[in-house]
Image: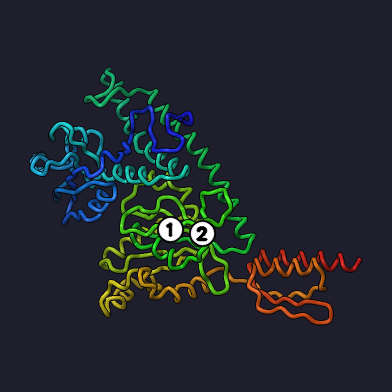
Amino acid sequence: MTDGRDRPANGPTQRSTGGIVPHRTDADANRRAVVAKRVDAGDADLTEITDLARAAGYEVVGRLTQTRTEDAAFMFGEGKVAELRELVRAREADCVVIDNDVGPYQTFNIGGKLSAGVEVIDRFTLILEIFGQRANTRKAQLQVELAELRYELPRAEAKASLAKRDERPGFMGLGEYDESVERDIKRQISEIRDELESIAQKEQARRQQRRDSGFDLVALAGYTNAGKSTLMRQLAAELAVDENDDRHPDLATTAESQDMLFTTLGTTTRRAEMDKRDVLLTDTVGFIADLPHWLVESFESTLDSVYRADLVLLVVDASQPVAEMREKLVTSHDTLYERNEAPIVTVFNKIDRLDPGELADKRAALSGLAPNPVAVSARTGAGVAELRDRVEAELPEWEEERLMLPVSDDAMSLVSWIHDHAHVDGETYADGSVTVTFEARPSIVARARSKAAELAATSST
């Protein structure tokens, strides 16, 4: 069953444009991959691309790096490509994962030097493949497809341009591309944007409904594998709220927490255990280094859960070196401060992995980016109580109110409503009246006053 865009309505994305990013099945599991990276200077770090490849289900059997300026034809130097070919043969790999943005010409040229059947994919194709595997909701599937289409569009335009210039259908054996392919991709992008906008409007209405019900909205942000989902499990109450489900909001779901990149792709919202405030905590897709703007924009509606929150908890893996923490903090700030207006609290997670004195050194080294972080271990629960206190302190201030109501059935209904939507400090009965003292969001206080005024007007007539 399809939805009219050659895409299964409830499954991985497939299109008539040629299958932009292949979504692998269980039969493709445990493919053997060689990871490779070129840098202009310094030493190439293959840690993240190795983790990404494993998250996608690849077995990493070889590694190759090169420090040199980019070669226009091969990305690497031709000698290094020959070395790559021998490494692939020796390790019997069937895939090369390159931790660079490799152009279509370079991909074709490298593939031509390798054995037949060996696939060449770049960093962003790998990320999209992981997203495709984890897209279990309609919204996530749409966002993955949008990212894939945005990734393919400039390549389709280049292929069409070359085909037109050379007066031939396609180039270098990469298939027939013409202007109709470009138009088809642009049409699909427009249709997906419209559908995502409709979903976003529903989610915005749901967020407003939750605020009107007295909830503060807190979002977890940060790099993938920083421990956001584990921290959510520490902070959350028993009842869960699924951001992407239209049924009753309290659902018995549990946020995943695994040592794997991109475990969370969609959003998961749960009630948080707090002292006074009613808080909904949302976990969403993690950041990752060097994401191009087209990929970030494709997941804009998911990031709205962060941008439109009352408070953001920016979770950082404190077990990493200071230089890596600093780089991730800078990138996270660039992503968040561009559109986010809510206060941001930095959370140094995984402090159980630090030696004595390390935490103080990292606090001092990163004080300019994280002037007053909260240190926790989501795994052990250390520091979580302090984090709860900080959340309540940083949320928008509540107003205090004291209402005196005549005792009646309607008044008791209002008292019950106040208990459900605010924090009641006191409730006393005397001389046929009830006095309620409470704290709440300004909008809740205003509604309580309005309801009390209506009761007073009714009782006086």
Q: With 408 as the anchor, is 439 left or right in this view?
A: left
Q: Residue at x 40, y 45 (%)?
A: 135
Q: With 273 as the anchor, is 86 left or right in this view?
A: left
Marks 2 and 1 close (CB-CB < 8 Å)? yes
Q: Residue at x 38, y 60 (%)?
A: 222
Q: With 135 as the anchor, is 104 left or right in this view?
A: left
Q: Amino acid under label 1?
A: Ala
Residue 241 image point, x, y percent: 53, 57
Residue 447 image point, x, y percent: 72, 64
Up-down relation of residue 145 to residue 322 (above or below): above
Q: Amino acid under label 2?
A: Ala
The part of the image, by quadrant, that contains residue 385 is bottom left
Q: Residue furthest top?
A: 167
Q: Residue furthest right?
A: 461
Up-down relation of residue 326 to residue 289 (above or below): below
Q: CA distance from mark 2 to mark 1?
A: 9 Å
Sooner in the amino-acid sequence: mark 2 or mark 1: 2
Residue topped by disc 2: 240
Residue topped by disc 1: 255
The part of the image, by quadrant, that contains residue 433 is bottom right
Is residue 341 visible in the rendered structure shown here? no
